[in-house]
Image (spheres, grey):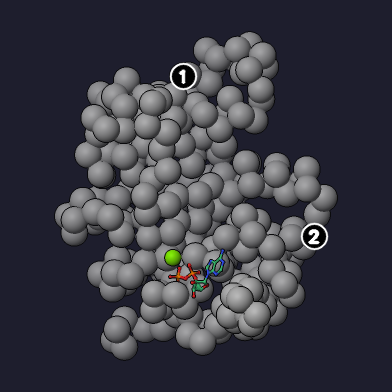
Amino acid sequence: MDQVSHLSARGLWKAYRKGRGTVPVLQGIDVDVEPGEMVAVVGASGSGKSTLLHVLGLLDAPDEGSVAIESQRIDNLPERRRDELRNGTFGFIFQFYHLLPELTALENVLMPHYIRHGPLAYLVRRGALRRQATELLERVGLGHRLSHRPSELSGGEMQRTAIARALSGEPRILLADEPTGNLDAATGQGILELLRDLNRERGLTMMMVTHDAQIAQQADRIVRLVEGRIEEWHPALM
Ligand code: ADP
Ligand code: MG
């Protein structure tokens, strides 16, 4: 099993400026995701779920508080180190896939490598990287869709492509923001099962935001964001 990671945050505060005032979003968040654990995050629309995920994944900075992996603080590292963590340690999946429309599925999966290595170093490694990307697309069930563009894929296939792309940097922590939010129930369930399998087979630590109680219940644990804070949540309460 791959190396697994413990993700934690302490005392996270974040507010957005609005006109002359500020809108408080995170108001003292403490949260832990154990190594290899899959945690679902629920909460009303606008409760700060995406903000929390972005702060944990270093896509956004908190006003106060800290984020750590294996108890090592990561949010205050130099920009270069944070870039490395965003590209290597974390993988991200979004509700609307964020695929590049003019690229094929294979090229979308290769894109993070292209950006990370630059065109020349990418060319040198292209053979190995294409093999790895092909294997990932096969793993998510898209071995027969390598040269399709997003417009030629179904919603579920686009999300599978985005999952393969998220795995291309061999992340230890996967952050998923409403990964089934744009899919019908059966397709969403297929995506959840794929994420669950990847969580188990690679020991991926996972935090997944979802509106869907059926989806949330399949995680190891559910937390809810209420008034800027985290509370443990139980399916019977949903
Ligand atoms: P959720 O994902 O739970 O729906 P978000 O984290 O997206 O909630 O947003 C939480 C609150 O912060 C909302 O009130 C939203 O309008 C506000 N917000 C989010 N991003 C920004 C931003 N970049 N600028 C200003 N306000 C924002
Ligand atoms: Mg959101």
Mark 1 vs ligand 2: CB below 8 Å:
no
- Residue 139 appears at what percent x and percent y? 35, 34
**Most foreground residue, 111 or 24:** 24
Dot 1 alpha-carbon crowd within 10 angstroms: few under 14, some 14 to 19, many 20 or more: few
Give me the residue at 50% from left, 56% from top.
175
**Most foreground residue, 180 or 39:** 180
Dot 2 alpha-carbon crowd within 10 angstroms: few under 14, some 14 to 19, many 20 or more: few
Q: Is residue 231 visible?
A: no
- Residue 88 appears at what percent x and percent y? 63, 41
Identify the residue under disc 2: 76
Query: How many marks on residues?
Result: 2
- Residue 178 appears at what percent x and percent y? 38, 60
Q: Nearer the viewer, mark 1 or mark 2?
A: 2
Give me the residue at 41% from left, 78% from top.
43
At label 1, the amino acid type is: Arg
At label 2, the amino acid type is: Asn
Does residue 220 appear to the left or right of 113 in the view shown? left
Give me the residue at 50% from left, 49% from top.
92
CB under 8 Å between callouts 1 and 2? no
Q: Is residue 87 visible?
A: yes
- Residue 107 appears at what percent x and percent y? 44, 24
In the rendered view, would you say 59 is above or below 7?
Answer: above
Q: Quadrant of the C terminus?
A: bottom left
**Which image quadrant is residue 21 in?**
bottom right
In the rendered view, would you say 48 is above or below 201?
Answer: below
Identify the residue under disc 1: 131
Does residue 224 appear to the left or right of 145 in the view shown? right
Give me the residue at 39% from left, 79% from top.
44
Mark 2: secondary structure: loop
In three-dimensional space, the C-alpha distance between marks 1 and 2, rounded to whole angstroms, equals 36 Å
Query: Who comes first in sequence, dot 1 or dot 2?
Result: 2
Where in the image, quadrant-wise, is ligand 2 located?
Answer: bottom left
